[in-house]
Amino acid sequence: MDQNVDITMKVNGQQVSRRIPARTNLVDFVRYDMELTGSHVGCEHGVCGACTIRVNGDIVRGCLMLAAQAEGAEVETIEGLSDAGEIADLQKAFHERNAVQCGFCTPGMLLTAQELLTKNASPSREEIREFISGNYCRCTGYQAIVDAIEWVAEERRG
């Protein structure tokens, strides 16, 4: 019995088709099949946010979604958002405000911050904290991350 499936999706704007094991999760697909290693595998239970990927415009936990569920979808990783310049201001703010230490959580944190600012151009510090609460950071204590997101929100508003 064949345990493989054929999938086709756009990954960072590039149409890809592969035959993969049916149980391959999305983060493993982008990391190992597509060699896009920016999304990390952390807890593998959907609670740490390290595996955050954007699918059809919404962030998802790549460890909880099967690659086959992304059939026909538009999948964007940290590499795609970075290459497109979409999050350049967030990346700069994270760097300048020391919101990056070990960097393990940073890709997921950046995707989450971008989604927040897309949905709410003027988030309060409490709203920022709430929105990123599903992304664990063991290094920064979150203060610098909240500062960076708040700064970008202010800059984007002009």
Image (cartoon, helix red, strand yellow):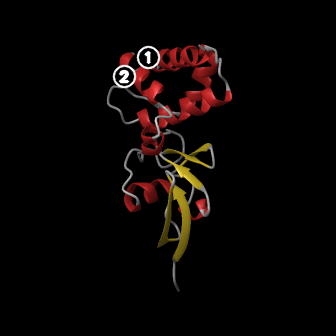
Q: Quadrant of the C terminus?
A: top right
Q: Is residue 70 above or below residue 45?
A: below
**Percent from the top left, x then y, of residue 50?**
45, 40
Residue nearest the observer in this picture, 104 or 80: 80
Disc nearer the start of the sequence (1/2): 2
Q: Is residue 18 above or below residue 114?
A: below
Quarter of the image where one finds residue 31:
bottom left
- Residue at the far left: name it: 102
Is 105 on the left or on the right of 129, as rendered?
left
**Pointer 1: what residue?**
144
Q: Position of residue 42 (x, y in %)?
A: 42, 44
Residue at position x 53%, y 40% from top? 47
Between residue 104 and residue 84, name the one nearer to us. Answer: 84
Where is residue 101? Give x, y as percent. 33, 26
Give neighbour class at mark 2: few <14, some 14-19, many 20+ (Cα, 10 Å).
some
> Do the residues bearing badges 1 and 2 touch, measured as CB atoms within 8 Å?
no
Identify which residue, 54 or 142, lies in the foreground.
54
Residue at image coords 53%, 70%: 22
Choose mark 1 or mark 2, whichever is in front.
Answer: 2
- Residue sitting farthest toward the bottom: 1
Q: Secondary structure at mark 2?
A: helix
On the image, which quarter does residue 65 sit in? Answer: bottom right
Q: Nearer the viewer, residue 136 or 16?
A: 16
Amino acid type at image mark 1: Ala
Pointer 2 residue: 95
**Tag 2: residue type?**
His
Which residue appears at 37% of the width and 17% of the height? 96
Q: Give the vertical position of 2 relative to 145 (above or below).
A: below
| Relative to 111, 107 lies left or right | left
